[in-house]
Image (cartoon, rainbow, N blue to C red):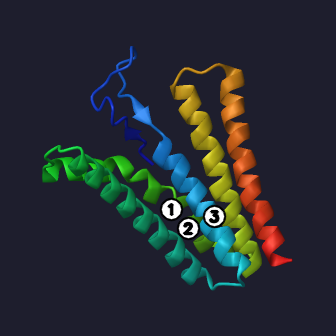
Amino acid sequence: MTPRTSPQEPDARRSTGRARTDYTGAIYGSLLAASVIAGASALGPFPRLELVVILLCTGVVFWAAHVYADVVGNRLSHQVLTWQEVRQVGAREWPIVQAAVPPAAALVISPLLGLGLTGTAWLGLGVAVAEQVAWAGAAALRAGASRLAVASAGAVNLVLGLIIVAAKVAVQH
């Protein structure tokens, strides 16, 4: 997954010479993926392929919505947009879709692990939550945060993921 370049400073360089990155889309996409898996699987067992398609399609739809909102927002502020700028917005928001890939891959390989449909959903949800925590920690590290701030970012995202897990459990019972 390629985190997006910050929209405020698209060519900004840190003292290390690396491009400044924004992990918002990756974190958001991971949270979205966890929500989709939890919500869909709480309604009943979905065949694996169906859940993968729902997961990936939802990522694409939310990506398109983010691109559209950004483009419309720029239009409303009277900025003239070119197709190149629209493509740049699309690329910047692409981590929303990319975040759906690891949980989708977990759903696909679940039969190799001997998991049924319920186990498959839990595996996908676990991967999505782990990914969300990892991206939050990576963002904090990249920002040069202290160890405490990195741990806090991970903990906050873990709590968000666990809220999704709790909602899934509550809806199923």
Name the front one of labels 1 and 3.
3
Q: Residue furthest top?
A: 15
Name the residue that disc number 1 marks: 101
Q: Relative to 162, say whether 137 is above or below.
A: above
Q: Secondary structure at mark 3?
A: helix
Q: CA distance from mark 1 to mark 3?
A: 14 Å
Q: Relative to 37, say whether 72 is above or below.
A: above
Q: Residue furthest right?
A: 173
Q: CA distance from mark 3 to mark 2?
A: 13 Å
Q: Answer yes or no: do the residues labelled 1 and 2 have beta carbons within 8 Å?
A: yes
Q: Amino acid at mark 3?
A: Ser
Q: CA distance from mark 1 to mark 2?
A: 5 Å
x, y percentage for residue 114?
A: 75, 76
Q: Relative to 11, say whether 75 is above or below.
A: below
Instruction: Residue 113: tell me if it is visible.
Output: no
Q: Looking at the image, which residue is at 60% across and 39% down? A: 136
x, y percentage for residue 118?
A: 76, 77
Quarter of the image with the C terminus in it: bottom right
Q: Amino acid at mark 1?
A: Val
Name the residue that disc number 3 marks: 35
Q: Which mark is residue 168?
A: none
Q: Nearer the viewer, residue 19 or 62?
A: 62
Q: Relative to 166, say whether 95 is above or below.
A: above
Q: Looking at the image, which residue is at 69% across and 77% down? A: 41
- Left or right of 110 in this view: 18: left
x, y percentage for residue 68?
A: 31, 59
Pointer 2: residues within 10 angstroms few (<14), some, or many (20+)? many
Q: Amino acid at mark 2?
A: Ala
